[in-house]
Image (cartoon, grey):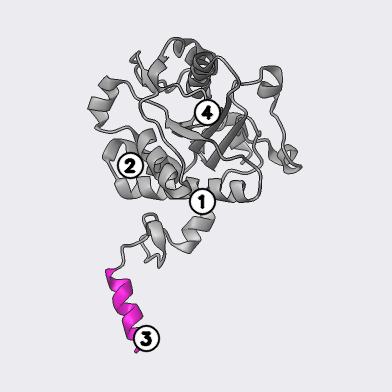
Amino acid sequence: MWSIINQIKSAFQPPCILCGSHPHQQDNLCAQCLIDMPWSKQGCSLCAEHMGIMGLDGDQMCANCLQQTPPYTRTVCAFNYLVPISGLVNQFKHQHNLAAGRLLTSCLSQTLFTKITQGQITIPQLVIPVPLHKRRLRQRGFNQAQVIAMGISQSLNLKINTRLCHREVYHSPQQGQSRQQRITQMKGVFNIAPKEVDQRINSIAIIDDVMTTGATVQALSKKLITAWGGPLDIQIWCVARAQPPDILLDW
């Protein structure tokens, strides 16, 4: 009897979003595909760049962060930006695949929950999404970072503010640009709404889908610190971290 019931349930259950099998669990992902995802490990505690065996022994900082410390204190990402994560992000952002978005948000939420319960990161008082320029928002129809941030806010019971930060300058896609080019291009891109600044808050998490060079979150972090005019702890929470090509060759 139970075998028949399970077969019926399986027939109506949506297939795994990656391999097409029936997942028998949430987020349309089967257990094996969940294991096989390119989970982020052994990364720099500040920027999450992969460090290989150097990152096995507690918190470590990469050479770039040692040379120039970023304005944020921690980066947490669920994945490295590799297949199939790159495909899921593309489906979410450009094809409005909300199932892919829910899956990515859920995986980031689980990663954050684990690190919080293990005492590896602190709980921020506020989460904010990286804003889109209004032109890009019209083109895409939604801000993927805001969708992710709202999901994280609900799952972890955190306060969210989508009015605090604004993107004032429109840029074409930054693919192919160097880290320094991106940093230069991001100067003056963001503005902070003075009325939304709450001096009682001293810890914020910035949420985005993919962190590439860190130029975007670095520019936004600096704007927030200036607007606060006082101590402000900033964490970066993102679904995936792009890794330098030389690191990926040895993956």
Q: Which residues are magenta?
A: 1-12
Residue 145 lies in the magenta-colored region: no
Judging by the rendered image, the residue that carries numbered circle 1 is 110
Viewed as shown, does residue 32 lie left or right of 20?
right
Count of marks placed on residues? 4
Judging by the rendered image, the residue that carries numbered circle 4 is 201
Judging by the rendered image, the residue that carries numbered circle 2 is 91
* Front label number (2 vs 3): 3
The one of 33 and 122 positioned closer to us in this rendering: 122
Give the Cα separation between the discs numbered 4 and 1: 25 Å
Q: Is residue 103 above or below residue 53?
A: below
CB-based contact (under 8 Å), mark 2 and mark 3: no
Q: Give SS at disc 3.
A: helix
Residue 8 lies in the magenta-colored region: yes
Give the Cα separation between the discs numbered 1 and 2: 21 Å
Which residue, as the protein is rendered here, is positioned at the far right? 57
Judging by the rendered image, the residue that carries numbered circle 3 is 2
Dot placed on the residue nearer the N-terminal end, 3 or 1: 3
Q: Give SS at disc 1.
A: helix
Give the Cα separation between the discs numbered 2 and 3: 37 Å
Q: Give SS at disc 4.
A: loop
Where residue 205 appears, as percent x and y from the top left, is 51, 33
Viewed as shown, does residue 132 lie left or right of 139?
right
Three-letter amino acid code of the residue under disc 2 = Gln
Tell me the quarter of the image containing the C terminus: top right
Seen at 47% across and 24% down, the residue is 198
Three-letter amino acid code of the residue under disc 3 = Trp
